Image (spheres, rainbow, N blue to C red):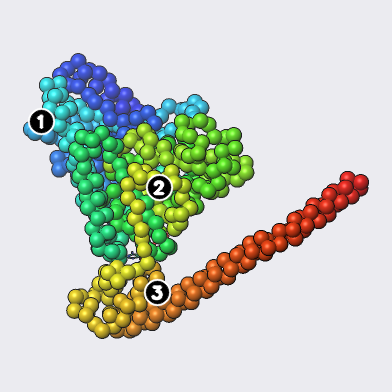
Amino acid sequence: VFPPELRFAVLKLFKRLFNCSSYCYFDITEIDGVNTNELYNAVQLYLSSSASITGSRLSLTRALNSSSTTFGLSNNDSLVDTFNGVSVLWEHVVTQRQSQTFSWRPLPEEKRGFTLRIKKGDKHLILNSYLDYITEKANDIRRKNQERFLYTNSRGGSLDSRGHPWESVPFKHPSTFDTLAMDPTTKKEIMDDLRDFSNGQTFYQKTGRAWKRGYLLYGPPGTGKSSMIAAMANFLGYDVYDLELTEVHTNSELRKLLMKTSSKSIIVIEDIDCSINLGNRKKSNSGGRQGYDGTPHEMRGGGGAGAGEDGVNSITLSGLLNFTDGLWSCCGSERIFVFTTNHIEKLDPALLRSGRMDMHIFMSYCTFPALKILLQNYLGFSEPDMGLQIMEEIEAVIDKAQMTPADISEVLIKNRRHKDKALSELLEALRNMAERRKKENWRSAREKNSTEVEEEEQEKRALENPKQGCDEEFEESCKKEEEDDEEKLN
Ligand SMILES: Nc1ncnc2c1ncn2[C@@H]1O[C@H](COP(=O)(O)OP(=O)(O)OP(=O)(O)O)[C@@H](O)[C@H]1O
Ligand SMILES: [Mg+2]
């Protein structure tokens, strides 16, 4: 019946008294300075599954759209856990924050933390292995629950009451490497690369490299770039941070966002060519808003999309490269950066140079081996079906048609109950498309030819009759001078 504040004060008093006894205490607060304390999250997860729960009161939570319920310690409740025969006491401490004076960012109303009480004699054992054990266990639970999150910074620069700039929803994208239609050898290469990366802790430590990797996915729309990111996340069991660059206004904001991401995560920037104006470097260099950040001026990008003449959005390419490459990128570990683009030719060479993005993956139009995967997934095709006569006809035309896996899946979904109809419609669609492509190619070749011929003729004319050109220029400049004079007189 005591108010929580009073209970906490009494508990604190008890703690003081116990302090002179044989116990020692460790506080694990939720927020450590500006960073979220990962150990707090790990302890919370670990305790929610602990079999030796003795707490008399548990809190139950289920996140929006989540499939599982988690239980944890209620505010200011405690439980006993045992590790290697040693008993420890965990207490969840929640206190109201004192009424705040002005602060540069809104702080949560409650201060949360766990207090671990152990016997002084057990200190060595606990600190050496118990906390590692908890972290490992929490990771296992996370993976097993398949409860991963998709984070977005769509709120702009504003923070929530806990000081997080990211909003999250449970990540439930069904795409996997099995459902992804692409060249099987490239797919295997990517999967091996990811596997090596996630098992590579000792390698990265030994070679002195930051434990991170970058992938650039490029190709036409509808070829599976976003699906590939989801497949990567599902394969590794990582969270996904979908970074909306247009919502980030400065390089330091970008850095803060990075600091608030957790390890074992994929940080995604979709359509990088649209998010940051890389083609407009000169204009942005002359803008005075960007401070010195140690990168040569040639490396600077323009303002992000939405960066108007007023330069409100002053994020630069160098800021972005620092984000992926610089010292700040190592403030966590096991990080994957993925950039996607439809137009690789528009990207700044600084972003493409070797070592920047470790793998450049071209997501192509649907090839025959990729089509086989779609047929297996959508129509339940097996090996004997692949020997059908119509498959040969499809194989003959598929490369010329240049259809995306997204277009082909549309045809297959529509007819998924009728295999034969699906195949015949697909063949027809492929043939129509191939015909269209042929005409398009022919037309563009003709246009190219005619412009070339025209240019040649113009050059010839200029060479044959140079005077004519000069006369025309002279006449025009005279005319302009006359007009200017008239204007001045008026
Ligand atoms: N390679 C593929 N394998 C399986 N399905 C695919 C593939 N490519 C596209 N699809 C299907 O098409 C839809 C759109 O694909 P996705 O969003 O991954 O394309 P994208 O390359 O990211 O396109 P955009 O460049 O427009 O973002 C997906 O929902 C998926 O079902
Ligand atoms: Mg996409």
Mark 1, secondary structure of its residue: strand
Within 10 angstroms of label 2, few (less than 14), some, or many (20 or more) residues?
some
Q: Position of residue 409 (x, y in %)?
A: 35, 71
Q: Tell me the residue that label 1 is attached to.
A: 86
Q: Is residue 241 left or right of residue 452?
A: left
Q: Kindly give the residue lying farthest to the right in the view shown.
A: 489
Q: Residue at x 30, y 52 (%)?
A: 233
**Ligand 2 quadrant?**
bottom left
Q: Nearer the viewer, mark 2 or mark 1?
A: 2
Which residue is drawn at the image coordinates 48% and 53% (left, top)? 346
Crowd tier of the residue under label 1, counting other residues whose Cα lies within 10 Å: few below 14, some 14–19, many 20 or above: few
- Please name the amino acid that badge 3 sits on: Ala
Residue 188 appears in the picture as rendered: yes
First in residue order: circle 1 vs circle 3: 1
Q: Residues within 10 Å of mark 3 (few under 14, many from 20)?
A: many
Q: Secondary structure at mark 2?
A: helix
What amino acid does circle 2 point to? Leu
Q: Nearer the viewer, residue 4 or 67?
A: 67
Distance between mark 1 and mark 3 Cα atoms: 68 Å
Residue 154 position within the rendered picture, expressed as x and y whole percent measured from the top left? 46, 48
Residue ID at (54%, 39%): 314
First in sequence: mark 2 vs mark 3? 2
C-alpha gap between disc 2 and disc 3: 30 Å
Disc number for residue 352:
2
For the residue marked with disc 1, what is the amino acid? Val
Note whether 108 is above or below 65 in the view shown. Answer: above
Picture disc at residue 401: 3
What label sits on residue 377 in the rendered view?
none
Q: Is residue 151 visible?
A: no
Give the secondary structure at mark 3: helix
